[in-house]
Amino acid sequence: MDYENKILQKYNLCNRCYGRIYAKLMRMGNKDRGTSIKTVIAMNFEKKLKELFEEKNMIIESSTQTPLSETDEEKIKKIEEEIYEIQKNLTILRKTGLNGIKNEYIIEELLKDEIEEQKNEKNKDEDKKESKDDVENVDNTPLTPEQKCPWCKDVFNPENLEEISNKIVEALSEYEFDKFLIGTRLPKRMKELEKDLEVNFNESNMESLRNEFGRELGKILTNKLKKPVDKETPDIVVMVNPYNQKIYLQINPIFIKGRYKKTKRGIPQSHWDCRSCRGRGCEKCNFTGKQYPTSVEEIIAEPVMNIAKGSGEALHAAGREDIDVKMLGKGRPFVIEIKEPKIRKMDLDKITEEVNNSEGVEISNLEYGVKNDVRFFKNEPHTKTYCALVSIVEEKIENYNFEEESINELPEKLENLRIDQRTPHRVSHRRADLVRVRNVYKAWCEPIDNKLFKLTVYCDGGLYIKELISGDEGRTKPSISEILGVPCYCKLLTVMDVHDENNPANY
């Protein structure tokens, strides 16, 4: 505890701010705590003052018949110096908002000097932009203790809190939300002040002003908005600078998860900018800025964005299929993220119906999700089942026919096979050049003719099936081409299912 008053000698803190320094010590409001601590300190000072005055009087009274000795004069001098310092500290306590200090122990001139000093500082700050003639007309009314406080600058004044809360209510009026959170932004100088208090005065029990301000403003807004404060998953975070009343809204996104099927080839998963104009618009893309007319992402996002009125969107899925690959089965798990939505509650059945009326994409199981769903879908491994139409490279091998025996043996050779797959050439421009280890767990083969067969593979997610078939010039080992001893390629590929559990479907 600051019984020597060192903190208040450096900073004229009001009762609230002084109490905030010891926020973790006593269960009461900061203002009450600060008043209580200052009162205890003042009582100690007054007790000491009384003892010093009594000691001084005793020395004087004992020397009424004879002049004071040098020793006595030295004692009195030291006592007066100590009295002056204590009186100065009591003046500081009184000046920073503590009432009830005994005037008989205060040197009034000290108090006048301090008030005059505050007047001069106020005049200097307010008169920077005024002429010399105007300076004489400045109101010299002494500042209140709260206004003098260098930490809070009177930001807890009810009028200030009311003005800020009204601004926030107006700013939030165009957004739909159920829960909110107040965040406080402190100017750099206030952060430095707090750091000085915490480090140089070893005050580990201190609470930051941002916490108290957010708490007090949150109480007011809860009453006005009739909505609760939520520290874990707020829909909106209101960032406030209490010193200049500037407000910034952080509108948290909404997440809608489900599964999608792509029943038509030629549709990319996400939007592609035109390769020629890079999205600016040109003759080649018919000034749309797009390489392809639409995408899975755009088809799903359009009806959601029309309702939510967000500033942007992003599709997060459990993997991705090539533009020429279908996605069937139960569908691929996905999350659509809507950024800064104005509307958060939507009829998901109606959105499902609208998307399913489009050509090529179907969705199901729509429900609201959370941010962690994005991490789960992108990082959690999902096993997958693929179906490929495999053909030999006819121009390289003449008059070659698959032996039915080789085809029948292929599933056994692929079962529980480890595949070392270096990043394929076709995606090396956007993926790190690594060797990834994946596994084929089960395979089924069905000959179609002497140069064509159907291959169904149940395997780890992330295994490039086209390269598993071709070998990608030796970058995938082993490959179907290597096992059969003949160059093969994938004519058509379909994702039959993305599994939530490691249980292959029956084919």
Image (tube, helix red, strand yellow):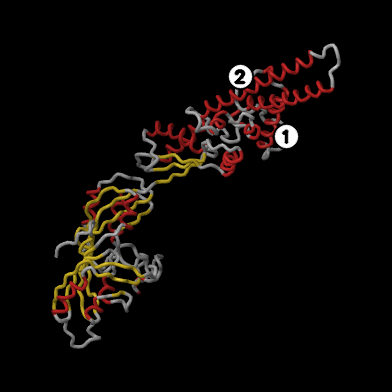
Q: Is residue 274 visible?
A: yes
The quarter of the picture where residue 134 lies is top right
Measure how far apart labels 2 and 1 are at the Cα level: 40 Å
Residue displayed at 40% across by 33% down? 222
Q: Which of marks 2 and 1 is in front?
A: 2
Q: For this rendering, which residue is in front, 498 or 141?
A: 498
> Residue 88, located in which quarter of the rendered image?
top right
Q: Is residue 322 left or right of residue 448?
A: right
Indicate the position of residue 91 as horizontal and vertical percent values.
67, 25
Residue 53 in picture, x, y percent from top left: 72, 18
User: How far from the left and from the top, in percent, is residue 234?
Assistant: 38, 42
**SS assignment at label 1:** helix
Name the residue tied to disc 1: 133
Tell me what residue is drawn at x 40 percent, y 31 percent. Answer: 223
- Which quadrant: the C terminus? bottom left
The earlier-in-sequence mark between 2 and 1 is 2
10 Å neighbourhood of mark 2: few (<14), some, or many (≥20)? few
Q: Nearer the viewer, residue 222 or 380?
A: 380
Establish if 450 lies above or below 168. below
The structure residue drawn at horizontal position 30% and vertical position 65%, both measured from the top left corner, is 462
Residue located 50% across and 29% down the image: 26
Q: In which quarter of the image is the N terminus?
A: top right
